[in-house]
Image (cartoon, rainbow, N blue to C red):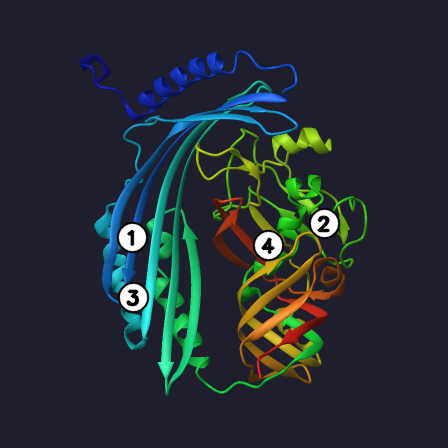
Amino acid sequence: MEGLGYETHDKKLERILGSLKKDAKEKIRYKSKESFFKEVFYETQNEINIVYENFKFKDVSRKIISGFSIREVKRGPDSFYSESKIIFPSYDIEIPINRITNLIKKKSEIFKDCKSFKIAFKGTRRLKFVENTLGNSAFDDSIKLYVVVQAVYEKNGKIGTARESISGEKLEDFEKLDEIFDEMVKRAKRQTEEGKRVSGKMPVVILSSAGGVFVHECIGHAVEADHIAKNLSVFKDKLGEKIGSDIVNIVDDPTFPNQRGTHKVDDEGTPALRNVIVENGILKNYIVDLKFSFILGLKPTSSGKRESYEVPPIPRMTNTIILPGESSPDDVIKECWKGILIKKLDGGEVDTATGDFVFGIEEGYEIEMGKVGEMIKKGVIMGKADESLKRIVKLANDLGFSPGTCGKDGQWVPVSDAQPTTLFEELLVGMPE
């Protein structure tokens, strides 16, 4: 076939990469003496976006983001230039849109009794090539599929809401959407029932089903290297110090398979590696990109991520995980004699400089004498990051993930977070009157 003027897919890609390597060397040939390094980044993102709301498709579209950027990295502001250009032509997700729309329509029948619902699907195939004057030269081709679902249920004038996110790499990863949707509807319905009001300082169990919102907000952002360098973190100058109880081990791991934050190389060409943030309660490392590896004198941790070629990379989380313990989830609950159990969190936020955090409780229950009791009203849990990690007294052997899209400095990138069923000896619980 090649002799007839045709080109195989692999040969075509090999030819494109060969051309990019020559172009990259020319673009980074000269750099100023005060620069740490110079870099060129090429990418093409082929996207499918689908929005299905109340049994009607509001959007079914494709989008291409493609171009290159040149960055010269310095201690102060970098010099940065980007240009729109098709880099990797004809490399799309290769999933027929009608397969996706048919799957969404079929699985969403479960929402027929809801007041409203919305399903947003985003599929991205991203091809990228990066080269810099440090010797990094890397290519990656990845597919990420992502679904965010929101449902609202109403009964006797009372409103219940539920939200879920699901990620995958192929459409078959979403075959159990109906089970997830069914649980969402049940959760929203439960919220229309009367709940018990509880408040004050008390033991709290967060189930693995709540995902890793806590670890993402409580410590993840605070150990990103730019926050450390800019004195915007409660964990600045704390390497080697005890910040959690002896059983707390936290990693940021882009090598964890089949998760939304997984990659082979980051957007600076640093190969993926498991980064141990906390080991037996001791702060061991930060989340470090190439620029801040020079500024802080630390090794890069494959954490340089960017939304697209149009913006420079910054230190970002990948898959941030509190590692499991040895107890069963039931034993963790039994250890809590009186307190609350949180089955699902409803987002949260943290002040990285002070460590103050607040998380919404989407679904929770009272614990009495080590047993799960009445449902509680929606409320919040509050605390300080550097104190709450020391108050973790028991970890289960399970692990629950929550995929998401994390925003920082105007950039949104894919991440995933996880933690096991966790017992805190004390957190502050607040609820409206």
Label 4: which residue?
A: 216
Residue at x 34% of width, y 66% of height? 178
| Quadrant housing residue 384 | bottom right
| Dot 2 or dot 4, earlier in sequence | 4
Query: Would you identify the image quadrant in which residue 400 lies?
Result: bottom right
Q: Disc 4 or 1, which lies upstream in sequence?
A: 1
Amino acid type assigned to the residue bearing label 3 in the image = Ser
Q: Report which residue position mark 2 lands on.
A: 278
In the rendering, at what x and y percent does residue 51 appear? 29, 56
Q: Earlier in the sequence, mark 3 or mark 4?
A: 3
Three-letter amino acid code of the residue under disc 4:
His
Q: Which mark is residue 50?
A: 1
Query: Looking at numbered disc 2 in the image, what kind of residue is underneath it?
Result: Val
Indicate the secondary structure of the residue bearing disc 2.
strand
The quarter of the picture where the N terminus appears is: top left
Residue at 51% in and 57% down:
402
Q: Nearer the viewer, residue 2 or 314?
A: 314
